Image (spheres, grey):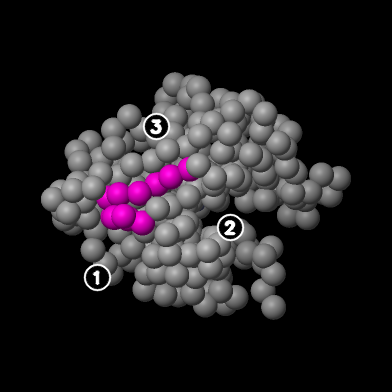
Amino acid sequence: MAGRDDWDYMRNGPDTWVDKFPMAAGSRQSPVNIETDRAESDHESLSTKPLRWKYPAYASRKLVNPGYCWRIDCDGEGTFLSGGPLMDDIYKLEQYHCHWGCSDSRGSEHTVDGQAFAGELHLVHWNTTKYRTFAEAAKAPDGLAVLGVFLKVGKTHEEMEKIARMLPYVSHKDEVVDIVDPIDPSKLLPDDNGYWTYLGSLTTPPCNESVTWVLFKKFIEVSHHQLNIFRNLRKFPRGEECPCHENHGAVINNFRPPLPLGNRQLRECGSF
Ligand SMILES: [Zn+2]
């Protein structure tokens, strides 16, 4: 049986995931390279009901190091994402997490006209209109919606700084801390709502083809120092020496390379 830890981004990297997680070989996989010329300007249908969200201050509950990223687990109660490609269905926030590189020139999962960003933030939501639990939604073609935000190196991001300051408390795999100082995920979104959207998958095993992707066109800025704090996370538990020693067991390059968009539709709404 494939266990949850039977994959990583190195020896058991994305090329090998399909051996244990057959869905990774599907035709609706993510991430993809966004060819901006190919995006269909679908302003009418997407903007009839604009994309809207609400995240109460208390929604972010726990900061977790699962060994391959940092993740904030949420209490979806009171959270809300609807409109745009999701139409009238109401989605709730389950968790948000981040992908990054070993240097500032790579780290995002999606690329835009072949260009990678320094990182990519994912806010993972599930469809509460049609499904009863996150697990049930994760198996359905319209079960999940992920907001993706590109990170570019620049000035210190204030809301991200709250997360960066807590990361030393979860420096090793399986460490968890309660979030006391509220973190507002809406402050991690860019100040322009223009986006690309397409139907894809989770970018980590089991790579379920259940995600409506909404990728903001505008990036947010985080500092080089903040990214370095992300890179200080370790992928092995405290007290256990890393068996690989490579990069001292640092969580880096935790991104899956782009897969073919194929004949899937890429739509866009709003400008940059
Ligand atoms: Zn992700």
Q: Which residue is mark 2?
A: 9
Task: First in sequence, mark 2 or 3: give its number.
Answer: 2
Q: In the shown orientation, is residue 17 left or right of residue 260?
A: right
Residue placed at 56% from the left, 74% from the top?
21
Give, as a three-letter code, the residue at label 2.
Tyr
Question: Which structural element holds mark 1?
Answer: loop
* Disc 1 target residue: 263
Mark 1 or mark 3: which comes first in sequence? 3
Which residue is tagged 3?
220
Magenta extent: 79-89
**x and y percentages locating residue 191 in the rendered image:** 32, 29
Residue count near mark 2 (Cα–Cα under 10 Å), binned few <14, some 14–19, many ≥20: some
Residue drawn where x is 62% and y is 51% of the image: 68
Residue 86 lies in the magenta stretch: yes
For label 2, the SS is loop
For this rendering, which residue is in front, 263 or 225?
Answer: 263
Q: How many angstroms separate mark 1 from mark 2 (CA)?
A: 27 Å
Q: Position of residue 107 (x, y in %)?
A: 47, 45
User: Whole-Å distance between the Cαs marked 2 and 3?
Assistant: 25 Å
Frontmost residue, 13 versus 46: 46
Residue 121 visible in image: yes
**Does 210 appear above or below 151?**
below
Give the position of the C terminus as an image quadrant.
top left
Farthest-out residue, right: 239
> Tag 1: residue type?
Asn
